[in-house]
Amino acid sequence: MGCILGKEAPSAIVHKDREERRDGENHGRKSKKASVENNDTVDDSAGKVDSGDNVAEIDDNGGKKDVVEHEPKPRGERKKLKPDPRSGRIPKQKLGEHVAAGWPSWLSAHVGEVIDGWLPRRADTFEKIDKIGQGTYSNVYKAKDTITGKIVALKKVRFDNLEPESVRFMAREIIILRRLDHPNVIKLEGLVTSRMSCSLYLVFEYMEHDLAGLAASPDIKFTETQVKCYMHQLLSGLEHCHKRHVLHRDIKGSNLLLDNEGILRIADFGLATVFDPNHKHPMTSRVVTLWYRPPELLLGATDYNVGIDLWSAGCILAELLAGKPIMPGRTEVEQLHKIYKLCGSPSEEYWKRSKLPNATLFKPRDPYKRCIRETFKHFPSSSLPLIDTLLAIDPAERKTATDALKSEFFTTEPYACDPASLPKYPPSKEMDAKRRDDEARRLRAANKAQADGSKKPRRERPARGVPAPNANAELQTNIDVCHSIMGIIMFSMFP
């Protein structure tokens, strides 16, 4: 189902499309200078788009470039927001093929390589059933394919089709998904759009659960063999991503999906990027959900690698064994303090070598002692060396996903169970867990009000705002002057 790979549009239709656009050919030549050349080299924030095995990088901050290597547009053209399909982004013949195949011109003009060889699905061929997820840039729905009868997941991505940079930012996820192919990585099955609509849906296989929803269920307690099974699949998926030079940058329970056969798939590559270990360039530190964010990102690092995903995997492993998140910070300052108390503070050598932007603000007065093994002494003994490695303060000491898969945790008894032998749970996602919590709170409030009965109701104070645990770093602005001062006071007062 979904898009069909490698099917060409009829040449007669393409020829007709070319005839209709012949009058605008001169305008297309003039606008080429204002477009970004296909062979431009830019950094992680520059929006390079390519296909196949070539590097594909889009802005981390919704389209703002750190480096701009093309000529500035004349003033008259700056106000012209609607993208010109004849801008020279792709060959006119290819553009004609895309439009003839049913793709909107604004999509083909700016990210034609993303859809090359694919055919779009119509929105009216899917029937939405329920909303099952929500993120910074998307909503996810459970839906039925009315043609095949198959249940799928539709991810509606948010972007501005009048802004080329916003379109390229949206396209980054599609580019990355097309270059990944592994049983433990979610697979893109198709794209849904139309020439008239400005929306775009990504079609995925429907997965009944996510790890956050299962872990939050009061009736579910994972055994050691089950934890090994889940972690082996997670690290196998990360190994594939990293070998393909992809950083996920948001590993957390709600992004680890599970089907009824026990197969785990890494999902939501909206914050992912492509990296080149041989040609480093600055990347944003505003990634990874707070509870799973490594210390180097909290300290403002812009030069990082696979270690950020491995830190998040270490947090997941400890969380599955503990039955709850191990470092649930409410702010970035508090999160860093929790990390230091558990994992120890960085060594003097690391401070000098890393030269992190926020090091002087959040360097504790007295060093913290590492106490992972003492804190988690009730964990299976084979898990402690792996947790110790994955939660190393120095990212270089976290090694690789391949090394983690060879660790004692997976090579000693009891071994990881077969995914097919995992219990069959009722559908459970993070959103379901939140609904259960909300319903429980409402019931407690109703019971309390009924018990009070004739008592005069007291005026309730407004609840204090607490950041949602699944909020992406890009939504939080708590590294500012106020928190910098708080950090200095905290680390000076509490050794």
Image (tube, rainbow, N blue to C red):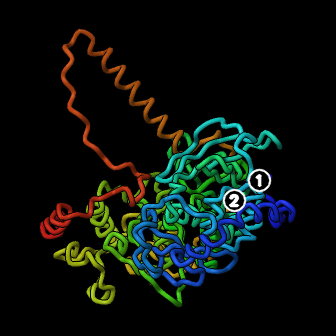
The image quadrant of residue 236 is bottom right
- To which residue does mark 2 refer? 188
**CB under 8 Å between discs 1 and 2:** yes
Image coordinates for residue 126, horizontal then vertical, percent: 72, 41
Above or below for 442 versus 259: above
Image coordinates for residue 373, horizontal then vertical, percent: 40, 70
Q: Which residue is drawn at 70% across and 57% down?
A: 103
- Packing grade of label 1 (10 A; few <14, some 14-19, many >=20) is some
Q: Distance between the residues labelled 1 and 2?
A: 9 Å
Q: Which amino acid does label 2 sit on?
A: Leu
Q: In this view, does 176 lie to the left or right of 64?
A: right
Image coordinates for residue 197, horizontal then vertical, percent: 62, 47
Above or below for 459 versus 150: above
The image quadrant of residue 37 is bottom right
Above or below for 225 versus 384: above
- To which residue does mark 1 refer? 2
Q: Is residue 136 left or right of residue 203?
A: left
Sequence-first disc among 1 and 2:
1
Q: Which residue is drawn at 33% across and 67% down?
A: 339
* Disc 2, SS: strand
